[in-house]
Structure formats: C-alpha cells, structure tokens
Image (tube, rainbow, N blue to C red):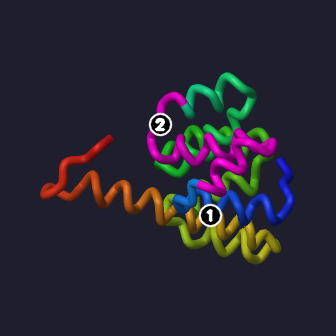
Amino acid sequence: MQYPAKVLLAWGEAISGNREIRDWLMQNGFPELALTCHALQLDDSARSWLMANQHSHLMALVSGTEGNAQAIQWLDKFGFNYLKDVALGADNNDEAVTRLMKSGQREWAGIALKIRSVKNHIESENNDMHKISRR
C-alpha cells in the first residue's frame, strides 16, 4: 500500500476533521482514505464499504486502533507492517510510533498520532457521564 507523501499528509488532515480535504480525497481517486475517516468515527456504512471494495487492510487498521488483537495479527500475517504499527500507535502504543519514525516512516507515524487523537477523543466522550453520546 503506497501513497504519495502529500496524499498521506492530506489524509492526516482529513482524519483530524478537515471535511474539504476529506471530500477532495473522495473525489480524486482516494475514496478508501476518505471512507476510512468515516470508519474511524464508527460509521458502519463506511466500514462495510471498505470490506466490500477490497480494502480489508484499512478495515483491519480501523479495528486494530480499537484494540482488536486479531486485526493486528491479520495485518502482520499479510505483511502490512506499517499499518500494524499505525494501528498500535493509534491505540496508544508509543513504541510502535517510535518504530515508524526510526524506519523513516514519518508520514505513517503522523497518521498514527492523528488517529490516536480522534480515537482518544471518542473514548473520552463516551466515558463522560455528563454527556450523551451521539454514537
């Protein structure tokens, strides 16, 4: 799975909530990245689309960020090493982010940290007894 560095940087911004960039990804040949943003936000239709359109590696990434050990094992088994470390890093594993940085994968490390921020925010919202979750 290879994307130009500029696309990965754009994806990171879309993950962080930039709708214009997410829409640009959707309309310019990267719908899987745009829909992964939705899948990270617990959108079941986006998750189904990823699976139905041969992007199971991205769905495994999403599941791995949610602590699914089987998804991490799947990524490892099928050689998606960077995605495995992105998922682990997004699930608050600092060693995985360090591995990405040491292997020269700064963009992927950045993606991991962007996803971490989103997932930790969702978790915080869900655990706040003073708020009613929209999810």
Residue 20 vertical position relative to residue 31 in the rendered view, above or below: below
Dot 1: few (<14), some (14–19), or many (≥20) neighbours within 10 Å? Answer: some
Point out which mark residue 43 bears.
Answer: 2
Query: Camera-side residue: 18 or 112?
Result: 18
Point out which mark residue 13 bears.
Answer: 1
State yes or no: residue 27 in magenta: yes
State yes or no: residue 21 in magenta: yes
Residue at (68%, 57%) from the top-left corner? 11
Q: Give the extent of the magenta segment.
A: 20-45
Give the x, y percent position of residue 26. Answer: 70, 43
Residue at (86%, 52%) from the top-left corner? 2
Sequence-wise, the earlier of marks 1 and 2 is 1
Residue 101 vertical position relative to residue 11 in the rendered view, above or below: below
Measured in 3D between alpha carbons, the distance from the residue under mark 1 to the one under mark 2, in whole angstroms, is 18 Å
Left or right: 81 in relation to 20: right
- Quadrant in the rendering for residue 107: bottom right
Q: Are marks 1 and 2 in contact (CB under 8 Å)?
A: no
Give the x, y percent position of residue 64. Answer: 56, 47
Give the x, y percent position of residue 120. Answer: 41, 61
Which residue occupies the extreme left position in the image?
A: 130
What's the amino acid at mark 1? Glu
Tell me the element at label 1.
helix
Query: Camera-side residue: 49 or 27?
Result: 27
Dot 2: few (<14), some (14–19), or many (≥20) neighbours within 10 Å? Answer: some
What's the amino acid at mark 2? Asp
Point out which mark residue 57 bears.
Answer: none
Residue at (29%, 44%) from the top-left corner? 134
